[in-house]
Amino acid sequence: MGASTPYNPKFSELYRDLLVTLDQNGVGSTLRLTKKALAHGKLGFYSCSAFSIGEEATIHANLYGKAFDAVVRVTDCCPKKDLYMIELEMVEDIAFQARIFLQLAAIANYKEACDCDGRCLTIDEAAFEWIEEHAESFAEEFESRVNDSVI
């Protein structure tokens, strides 16, 4: 990739096009990731709605037309200005599914960065390059961020 390409393989850069919603007992909200969205086995989000701590909910993620659902438990919900900062933990063991979903997001982000740099790659070409250049560090970062979680 050229030097001007804005691609950054870190998790924080992957979520721009990710739509995440949370539903709990009829209460639903679109979520926005916090700066430390995935740390110590917990997922951090901002929400317009409050959620009941200790109760399960369903998180729905959609990226480039691909959907991913999981059962989570709300472990914290704090008011912060006009939003709520919520913390979730996975109830199901979904590590493999979550990793594949995030890798697809990373590859799509990489392809978009290449396109912006004038390199129009197919998704297969982008995937091949991304795997060669970033798969190992992605795996290490993923494992380090979920090291004490069931995801």
Image (spheres, helix red, strand yellow):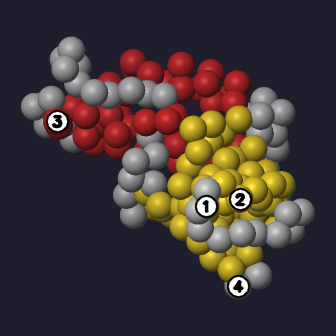
**Which callout, 3 or 1, points at the residue further toward the start of the chain?**
1
Distance Cα–Cα, label 1 vs label 4: 19 Å
Q: Whole-percent x and y of residue 103? A: 49, 39
Distance Cα–Cα, label 4 vs label 2: 20 Å
Q: What residue type is labelled 2?
A: Pro
- Give the secondary structure at mark 4: loop
Q: Which residue lies furthest to the top in this view?
A: 3
Going 21% across and 32% down the picture, which residue do you hit?
114
Determine whether label 2 and label 3 are within 8 Å by CB. no
Query: As drawn, is 97 to the left or to the right of 16?
Result: right
- Please tell me the numbered disc located at residue 116: 3
Q: How crowded is mark 1: few (under 14 residues within 10 Å), some or many (20 or more)?
A: some
Going 86% across and 68% down the picture, which residue do you hit?
55
User: Which image quarter is the C terminus in?
Assistant: top right
- Please tell me the numbered disc located at residue 52: none
Q: Which amino acid does label 4 sit on?
A: Gly
Distance Cα–Cα, label 3 vs label 4: 41 Å
Q: Residue furthest right?
A: 54
- Foreground: disc 3 or disc 4: 4
Q: How crowded is mark 4: few (under 14 residues within 10 Å), some or many (20 or more)?
A: few
Q: Which amino acid does label 1 sit on?
A: Leu
**Which callout, 3 or 4, points at the residue further toward the start of the chain?**
4
Q: Whole-percent x and y of residue 30? A: 54, 67
Query: As drawn, is 60 to the left or to the right of 63?
Result: right
- Give the secondary structure at mark 3: helix
User: Which image quarter is the N terminus in?
Assistant: top left
